[in-house]
Structures are given as C-alpha cells and as structure tokens.
Image (cartoon, rainbow, N blue to C red):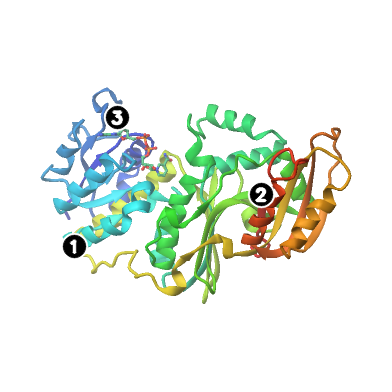
C-alpha cells in the first residue's frame, strides 16, 4: 500500500521529537500500519540553519508554512508551532485544502476547538489533538474511546509538570518557592516568564479540553476558576503533613446537583491518595465513571519524546483512516449545554478548608478569627501551630469543617481587615474525597 505523506510545521521541542521518532521507529510503524509514513515537507522559520538528520533528504525544507499546506502530495499536516496566531492560519488553510490535521496546540483547541472541529467535520477531514494535553499520556484516546461507554462524574488531574516539580521539590527539601522556581528555570523546566505554569493558566487550558471531552460540553477556560501556587510556602507543607495531607495544583471537574464545578487551584490532598504520589514533572489524570468507577492515567506531561509519541500515534491513526476508510466523525464537543453539565461557580462547592495565617502575635487573635467564622456559620475543626522563633510573624493554621466556598470567601474578606494579620489568610480546600 502507498505511503501516506506528511508535512510538519514547527521543528521545536515537539516537532524535532516527532521527526526523530518517525525516523528511528519507521520500520515498526510501517509494520503496524501496513504502509509507511513519509515526511514530504518540513517547515520552521529557521529551517535552513537546523541540523535535521531525522528528516528525509527528499523532504521539501521551507520557511513558509503555505508550501507545506499546498504541497500536492501532503495528506496530513502536523501543526507543531503553538499559540493562537499563525497556528490557527495553518489549521484553517489545511482544512480548507481538504487535508487532515494533527496538532499539539492546547491553547488553540481549548479556546476554539468546537469551531475548528465543526469546520473539519464539514470538510470531511480528520483532526487529532492527543499531544495537546498531558504530552505522553494518551488521555484523549481514553476519553473518546477507551471509557467512552461510561458516564464520567468527576475528573481530577495534575496537568502542569512545572508547578508539580516546584511543589514536590519544596515539599522534599523545604526550599522557598522563589528558590525552587529559579532552579526550575535553570534546568529548563520553567520558562523565563513562568506565569502560564505557576499561575495555573496552562493547566486551565488543559482542563478545559479534558472536561470538554469527558462531559461532551463546550467548556472554555473562562468557565474555570483558577488560582496559582505563588503563595504556597514550605510551612504549608509542614502543616499539611501534620494533617496527613500534601499540596498539589489540583485540576478538578466534577458533576454536582447544581452543575459542573471546574477549578485549577492548590489544594490539600490526603497523603494516602494515589495523586499524592505524583512527583516532579509527571502528570496524572484520575477519572471517575458512574459505571466503571475509578481509572487512573500517569506519565510524562511534556518533552520532545513523550509528546512526539503522542503526535506520531495521532499521525498513524489519521493515516490508517485515510488508507482504510474512516467512520463518520462526531465532534468530541458534541453536546449542547445540558443542565447537569453546565459550568457553575466554584463558590457553590462544599469542602473542608485549611486557613493559614501569619500574624503579629498578641492576645485575642484566635477569639477574633473564631468570631468571624462563627458569624458565617463555619465550624472550626482544629488549630495547629508549629514552633516559631518570631512573635512578629507567627504562622498558624485553622482547619474548618465542610462548608460552602462562598462562606469561606466572605470570612477571609472580613479577616483580611484585621490589623494583626501580616498578609491575607491563605485558604485552600481539603480534597478529602479523593
Ligand atoms: N514542549 C512540550 O513538551 C509540549 C508538550 C505538549 C504540547 N506542546 C505543544 O506543542 C506545540 C509546540 O511546542 P514546542 O515546545 O515544540 O514549541 P517550540 O519549541 O517553541 O517550537 C515551535 C516551532 O514553531 C516554529 N515556528 C514558529 N513560528 C513559525 C512560523 N510563523 N512559521 C513556521 N514555523 C514557525 C519555530 O521555528 P524556529 O525553530 O525557526 O524558531 C519552532 O520550530 C505548542 O502548541 C505546545 O503547547 C508542547
């Protein structure tokens, strides 16, 4: 059977990993498919100065992505540029030319995925986006195929390797957030501008995509409450451990009586939960189904090779459908907004909370804080204080029994006006249900 010709636009981390796997694993891929995948064209802005032993000598090398999309032999275009500018043009032009698309672009798919899918379906071409979330974990295939017979009730994830690396290093070594972030930047785990990772926006795009696939909903990042990890300090891990918990940037999408509650935020999770074992730059996704119950997926969330595997596997699936025929496609964002899947405010959620304070010590502090909690009908569960040298910046923690997020927000707002506080209280949910 004839080879399927591929064009690759973007030869950075993911593009170079993809090319290397296509070259080094070419024979296995051909055996699995029954035909070869042939790279007919490659493109990047600096393609002529790139050392590309993995690209076939016959491949067109160009700085203009249009040459790849318009190449008559190319049947699948891999968009591995990223962002929402030129990447959107590449995908739109490929669809318009009747070419299938493989992309690793979470940003674009999270914000415009439903519209792009609609265009792809109308054009009768295939679209694959496995690499866009959790690089090396085939979570799209799981949600679209593996457990598609189930009805997902909740999905939890650790979806950002950089913030997980920072949190787990702080936990292991007791180092401050800023110092570990600096190390992560030196090691290449964190960008020079780390905001997308540590403020939760990267994880939010990924959760939007996964929740859309899991619940068949048009969920956009704006539907998701987001809070980053900048305020977490080593003392929070000390207190969390005393409570037999740890802290992770938890991405959560769960079905409730009111609708879907979606959030990306640091949370306390029990040390005994499987998610607490996810260390360093690894990612994990935990899905709960009404019928099949719990399934858990774990692997590298980024990197040229794990993400390259996801792209190559997508190329294989799309190529197989091109050669052997494709079933009629339904967009993974197929549902209209059904009541039970409608995103609702995280303020409706009920959880136990961890409240951490830094105070200028004086008599009456606990009474003042307890008074505010009581006025919001919040029941105090415990007060913890680790030994500390200074009375002028004294940390301690109050945990409260399950209550609505809205009442905790109201209490924190009122507490923030108290003059003995060194900074506003840090409030983290305790995900005891995990
Ligand atoms: N890095 C990961 O581990 C990872 C994991 C999962 C998903 N992703 C996603 O994969 C995509 C690519 O990420 P990456 O880390 O590989 O990015 P990257 O290293 O910055 O590579 C981007 C590539 O796109 C090329 N490019 C940029 N603008 C272009 C233009 N106008 N015309 C032609 N080529 C252009 C760049 O060319 P030059 O080389 O000439 O500058 C570069 O080769 C993103 O959507 C990202 O979110 C990445």
Within-10-Å neighbours for mark 3: few <14, some 14–19, many 20+: some
Q: In whole angstroms, how far apart are the C-alphas of marks 1 and 3?
A: 36 Å
Name the residue: 37% across, 38% down. 17
Beta carbon at label 1 within 8 Å of ligand 1: no
Counting from the top left corner in percent of width and height, residue 210 is at 44, 58
Q: Residue at x 77, y 62 (%)?
A: 374
For the residues labelled 2 and 3, say whether their Cβ atoms are less than 8 Å apart: no
Q: Say whether residue 389 is left or right of residue 332.
A: right
Give left or right: position of 273 versus 260: right
Q: Which mark is residue 314?
A: none
Give the mark toward the camera: 2 or 3: 2
Q: Nearer the viewer, mark 1 or mark 3?
A: 1
Point out residue 309 in the picture as x, y percentages from the top left corner.
Answer: 39, 47
Q: How many marks?
A: 3
Label 2 SS:
strand
Residue occupied by mark 3: 52
Tag 1 residue: 122
Apparent side of residue 101 relative to residue 236 in the rendered image (left or right):
left
Q: Is mark 3 within 8 Å of ligand 1?
A: no
Residue 34 visible at all = no
Q: Quadrant of residue 229?
A: top right
User: Which residue was labeled with disc 2?
Assistant: 247
Q: Ligand 1 closer than 8 Å to the CB at disc 2? A: no
Q: In this rendering, does residue 171 appear at all?
A: yes
Pick the residue in front: 167 or 346: 346
Measured as percent of width and height from the top left, residue 313 is found at: 35, 52
Percent x, y for residue 85?
A: 28, 40
Question: Which comes before the other along the chain, label 1 or label 3?
Answer: 3
Task: Give the SS element for disc 1.
Answer: helix
Position above or below: 246 against 190? below
């Amino acid at each position: 059977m004839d080879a399927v010709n591929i064009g690759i636009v973007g030869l950075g981390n993911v593009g170079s990993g993809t090319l290397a796997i296509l070259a080094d694993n070419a024979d296995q891929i051909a055996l699995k498919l029954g035909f070869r995948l042939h790279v007919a064209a490659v493109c990047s802005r600096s393609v002529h100065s790139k050392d590309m032993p993995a690209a076939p000598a016959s491949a067109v090398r160009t700085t203009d992505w249009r040459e790849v999309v318009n190449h008559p032999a190319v049947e699948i275009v891999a968009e591995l540029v990223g962002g929402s500018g030129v990447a959107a043009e590449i995908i739109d032009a490929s669809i318009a030319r009747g070419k299938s698309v493989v992309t690793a672009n979470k940003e674009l798919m999270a914000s415009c995925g439903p519209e792009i899918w609609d265009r792809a379906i109308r054009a009768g071409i295939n679209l694959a986006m496995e690499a866009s979330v959790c690089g090396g974990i085939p979570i799209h295939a799981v949600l679209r195929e593996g457990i598609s017979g189930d009805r997902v009730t909740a999905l939890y994830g650790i979806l950002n390797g950089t913030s997980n690396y920072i949190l787990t290093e702080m936990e292991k070594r007791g180092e401050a957030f800023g110092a570990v972030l600096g190390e992560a930047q030196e090691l290449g785990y964190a960008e020079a501008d780390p905001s997308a990772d540590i403020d939760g926006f990267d994880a939010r795009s990924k959760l939007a995509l996964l929740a859309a696939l899991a619940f068949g909903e048009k969920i956009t990042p704006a539907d998701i409450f987001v809070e980053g990890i900048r305020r977490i300090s080593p003392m929070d891990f000390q207190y969390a451990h005393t409570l037999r918990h740890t802290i992770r940037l938890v991405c959560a999408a769960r079905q409730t009586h009111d609708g879907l509650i979606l959030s990306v935020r640091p949370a306390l999770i029990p040390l005994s939960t499987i998610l607490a074992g996810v260390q360093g730059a690894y990612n994990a996704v935990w899905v709960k189904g009404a019928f099949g119950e719990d399934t858990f997926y774990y692997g590298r969330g980024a990197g040229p090779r794990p993400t390259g595997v996801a792209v190559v596997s997508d190329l294989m699936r799309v190529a197989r459908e091109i050669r052997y025929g494709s079933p009629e496609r339904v967009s993974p964002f197929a549902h209209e907004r059904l009541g039970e899947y409608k995103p609702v405010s995280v303020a409706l959620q009920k959880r136990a909370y961890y409240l951490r304070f830094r105070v200028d010590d004086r008599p009456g502090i606990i009474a003042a804080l307890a008074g505010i909690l009581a006025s919001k009908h919040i029941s105090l569960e415990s007060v913890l204080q680790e030994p500390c040298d200074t009375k002028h910046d004294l940390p301690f923690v109050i945990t409260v029994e399950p209550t609505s997020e809205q009442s905790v927000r109201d209490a924190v707002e009122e507490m923030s006006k108290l003059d003995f506080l060194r900074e506003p209280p840090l409030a983290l949910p305790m995900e005891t249900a995990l």
